[in-house]
Image (cartoon, grey):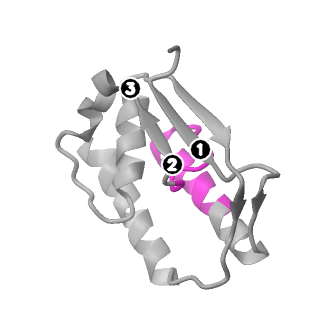
Amino acid sequence: NKYNLIIWTRNSSLAKRNILKKIFWKLAKIITNIVLWTNISDTQCWFKLFKREKIDIFNNLKNYWWSFDIEILYKAFLKNYKIKEIPVKWTEIELSHVKFKDYVKTFIDLIKIKFYN
């Protein structure tokens, strides 16, 4: 009851990730936290739990690509929601469709999120 939002994170010893993805993930985390002034360790883990009365942060979303959850978390941060991160057991699969251009697009979305919210 003391948290408005619970997010699971792959930032733990429970997560098994290949070295290249781990490096990109850490770099993305640093950039995201610098641009948005947050301290969330894993914005892209899809496991998130919201209190019903706090789902107003879903209103007026501007990003509907991979960045939509970053925007949601940023709105929660701006509203001073209490966020709890819980480690999740995660095993990376080798097959990935994420390309370098996807990281570039996400960075551009970060800038949009920062200035449109």
Q: Is residue 67 above or below residue 8?
A: below
Query: At x 49% / y 72%, what residue is drawn?
Result: 103
Task: Indicate whether residue 39 is drawn in magenta.
Answer: yes
Q: Which mark is residue 61?
A: none
Image location (x, y in percent) of residue 31: 56, 55
Where is residue 5 shown, x and y percent of the image?
46, 30
Do the CB atoms of the residues marked 1 and 2 lie less than 8 Å apart?
yes
Distance Cα–Cα, label 2 vs label 3? 14 Å
Structural crowding at the residue carrying mark 3, measured as other residues with C-alpha within 10 Å and reported as few (<14), some (14–19) or many (≥20): few
Sooner in the amino-acid sequence: mark 1 or mark 2 = 1
- 33 w.r.t. 45: above or below: above
Distance CA(mark 3)–CA(mark 1): 15 Å
Q: Is residue 56 above or below residue 58?
A: above
**Mark 3 sits on what residue?**
51
The front one of 33 and 5 is 5
Badge 2 amino acid: Phe
**Could you tell whether 9 is left or right of 103 in the image?**
right
User: What label does residue 8 carry, if any?
Assistant: 1
| Magenta region | 26-45
Q: Does residue 64 appear to the left or right of 110 in the view shown?
A: left
